[in-house]
Amino acid sequence: MNNINKTMYIPLFGKSYVSKKGIILQDKMAEEIWAKEEFELKGKSATKWLAYYMGMRARVFDEWVTKKMNETTGVVLHLGCGLDSRAVRVTHKKHHWYDVDFESVIEERKKYYTEDELYHMVASDVRNTSWLTEIKEETAVVVMEGISMYLQIEDTQKLLKELGEHFKTVHLLVDVYTEFAAKASKVKNPINDVGVTDVTGIDDPMMLCKNTGFSFVAKCEMTPQHLIDELTGLEKGIFKTVYAGSIADKTYRLYEYVKK
């Protein structure tokens, strides 16, 4: 497993950590997988502050997917799924769900997840969309959580263009590093702890609209107040000051797009 794939253990730890504490995110699968995998994290990647952030990010994506599924029919695509259990956390009784990641990651997933009539795992580089031919629905709800920074902007644009060509309507939620964060990541980022230093940053959300057919909808809140309020005392104050608001916005952003 390469270093980029190893980054999947950072959010897994975070989701396991907050779930055990009974705050922000209920994720028993993350607890189970983390306990069995015994992957060693060090430095900033294993701090409670990053764990809170990862838990909040996952919860925001969960709530967005739930909302979009209630509003639309079609399929859900989780691109770069890692070991995430969103397909378990979010009920999708009427939607086909495709979790997509590299072959080595999907092999790992299959130790814990089982495909059924609605749930599917696809072993593929997300930049290769040939597997989409098997999907006949016209609408897709797409989540790209924690992967845009590992793709070149041109690769992401190409991916979105191909998604837009296959589906009549696409709803997309994607988190991005800023250009400042990408530069800083060469020397200071929790992903450095698993050997990753080269990442992509995007300051202008319109970059992902260029030649893709997508329209920018909104900048979303990664750490909403109702989730910060699940922390208490000094931790709540420190997190709100250092890891949320304008300071966090300088490094990390969450964007919603649509293609119709």
Image (cartoon, helix red, strand yellow):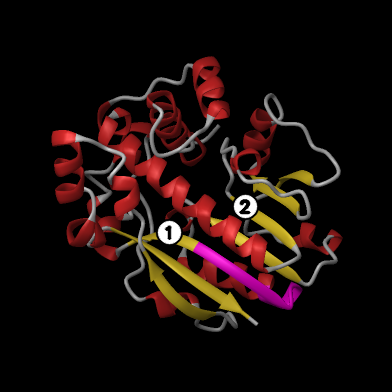
Is residue 52 within the magenta segment? Answer: no
Three-letter code for the amino acid on which mark 1 is drawn: Asp
In the rendered view, does 213 fall on the left or right side of 48? Answer: right
Say what secondary structure mark 1 lies in: strand
Say what secondary structure mark 2 lies in: strand
Three-letter code for the amino acid on which mark 2 is drawn: His
Camera-side residue of 21 and 245: 21
In the rendered view, does 9 fall on the left or right side of 94? Answer: left
Specify the quadrant of the image occupied by residue 206: bottom left
Residue name at image x 58 percent, y 57 percent = 65
Camera-side residue of 37 and 245: 245
In the rendered image, which residue does mark 2 sit on?
Answer: 78
Residue name at image x 50 percent, y 16 percent = 35
- Magenta segment, which residues? 164-173
In the rendered image, which residue does mark 1 sit on?
Answer: 175
Please, is residue 148 above or below residue 40 in the view?
Answer: below
Q: Position of residue 89 (x, y in %)?
A: 60, 40
Around disc 2, counting alpha carbons within 10 Å, would you say few (fewer than 14), some (14 to 19), or many (20 or more)? many
Mark 2 vs mark 1: which is more N-terminal?
A: 2
The C terminus: image quadrant: bottom right
